[in-house]
Image (cartoon, grey):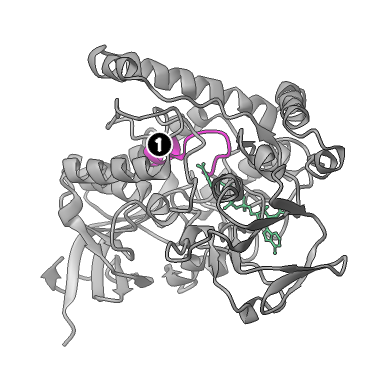
Amino acid sequence: MEQINTVDVLIVGAGFSGLGAAIRLAQEGFEDLVVLERGSDVGGTWRDNSYPGAACDVPSHLYSYSFAPNPDWSRAFSPQGEIYDYIRRVTREAGVREKIRFGVEVTAVDFDEPRGRWTVQTSEGTYDARVVVLGVGALCEPRNPDIDGIEDFAGPVFHTARWDHSVMLADKRVAVIGTGASAIQVVPSIAPTVAHLDVYQRTAPWVLPRIDRTYPDLERKAYRRIPGLQRAVRALQYASREFQVVGLTRSRAALAPIKALGRAHLAMQVRDRKLREALTPRFEIGCKRILLSNTWYPALSRENVDLVTSPITRVTSDGIVTADGVEHPTDVLVVATGFHVTDSPFFERVRGTDGRTLADKWAGDGMEAYKGTTVSGYPNLFVLVGPATGLGHSSMIYMIESQLNYLADAMQTMRARNLQTVDVREVVQEAYNDELRANTGDTVWTTGCKSWYLDDKGNAPAVWPDFTFVFRRETREFDLSAYRRTPVGATEPSSSGARA
Ligand code: N01
């Protein structure tokens, strides 16, 4: 007979959100937990996105856990390796590494209503859990472009989030498809080493100067020694980013100064009129994520770099053919084409009380949850970085920590009230989302551009349409009245199995 691992809380994913949940729940006295991670290390997106030039475009004092400030950040915007090291260190210091099972892929998450528990199938056997926390992340499933002939390309093809470090790019003719946040970091990093680089642009992005600097020793010492200094810097970084929300969600006029800055940045960095014309954004600033770079435009102005704006029609065994009939010889093909966000394949693996998957449930009106975290018909399931929690302007860790407050209070409430399950009421969830949609209608994200914020209906269910402190306030306490509950004892007793 198959051995079932019984555990109180099962967390899927060991990135910033899943680890944050493990640390917070352990602190709150919920020690009987396991984290299942398909990779071989912690870090999630910061482990996977190791492409040349990968860095954060949110300042590091803000892009870190509030409970684990790091006075030793080397610069304002940390490179990927430093963030990856930070996550590993925090995991070790918080003592949660032993809670993580690496190399375990979660294949199915099914709610067993009579028992009021979740059955979780994995590549390493079955788990039985009272509470499931999804920390799978929003930007984790690479979206590969569906281009005619791409499977026949003879050279290496890889996504930025799955960078193949064994491929030497020196002296190669390289193509990069896409001009989003990932591409604008990769291109300047590899341009000086490759023989030739073609950058395929479908939509010219808005790019602002990156006000980055290294932190001198003295400053780092000050962060270590002067109480409150780092917190004050973090608060300033938070406030300056939060100003953007006015323009993104309320008054377009507030975006005028950053639009002017973007235009000036392009004009100053690109002298060639034709290239400047091709790089001029044609959509409202903020509709897609605003990118930060001082090196993107200079890289595109290099002798060995071509910006290709004619649409790709097909890929051959050794090149890319564009609509203008030109065949561009290519040795290595890099796709910087983003992620499945509103259509994550993980949604197909989670089945609630009526046996429907999250993917099916969200196929009609789009993905939605209550406070970005709980979904009606999926009791005791907490989705971190869930629907309507994404940000373009500030730190996702702030949103994650808000959700952790809600999760921790939900767990304490269930413990105090002796509850087996909590399931958000459908009417409450609907009312919450009606209001969110009404707000999102006025935002810049639905003004006509294409982005990962949007679903196939043109709604923006992935992104939080207000100030982030409003979300923090909303999630401060678990609001039990919004939930249907089952007391302990009202469900069938749990079958016993091995402790995970
Ligand atoms: O992906 P994207 P990304 N043919 O979806 C193009 C985070 N991030 O990986 O604009 C040709 O933004 C597509 O074109 P278009 C951050 O939240 C953070 O760059 O749709 N082109 C676009 O140019 C970011 O928002 C950091 O017309 C195709 C690009 O590919 C998110 O990750 C760093 C195509 C995709 O852009 C995703 O960024 C990096 C096709 N078939 C990433 N399909 C930080 O610094 C797509 N494109 C924190």
Where does the C terminus fall, quadrant-wise? bottom left
Q: How many marks?
A: 1
**What is the quadrant of residue 92 in the picture?**
top left
Left or right of residue 201: residue 354:
left
Residue 341 included in the magenta stretch of the image: no
Q: Report whether the residue tagged 1 is closer than 8 Å to ligand 1.
A: no
Give the residue number, with chain letter if any, for mark 1.
402
As drawn, which residue projects farthest toward the top?
A: 226
Residue drawn at (72%, 24%), measured in percent from left and top? 261
- Residue 474: give x, y in percent of width and height: 46, 34
Residue at the spot 53% in from the left edge and 63% down from the top edge: 344
Q: Residues within 10 Å of mark 1 (few under 14, many from 20)?
A: many
Q: Position of residue 72 (x, y in %)?
A: 30, 28
Amino acid carrying mark 1 in the image:
Ser
Residue 222 placement (x, y as % from top left): 29, 14
Let me know if residue 393 is in the magenta part.
yes
Magenta segment range?
389-403
Quadrant (top left/top right/bottom left/bottom right) for the N terminus: bottom left
The residue under the point 81% across, 43% down is 275
The answer to whether any part of residue 79 appears in the image is yes
Which residue sits at x=65%, y=75%? 150
Element type at mark 1: helix
- Residue 490 can be seen, yes or no: no
Task: Choose top left, top right, bottom left or bottom right for residue 108.
Answer: bottom left
51, 317: nearer the viewer: 317
Image: 223 above or below 379: above
Residue 6 placement, left or right of 69: left
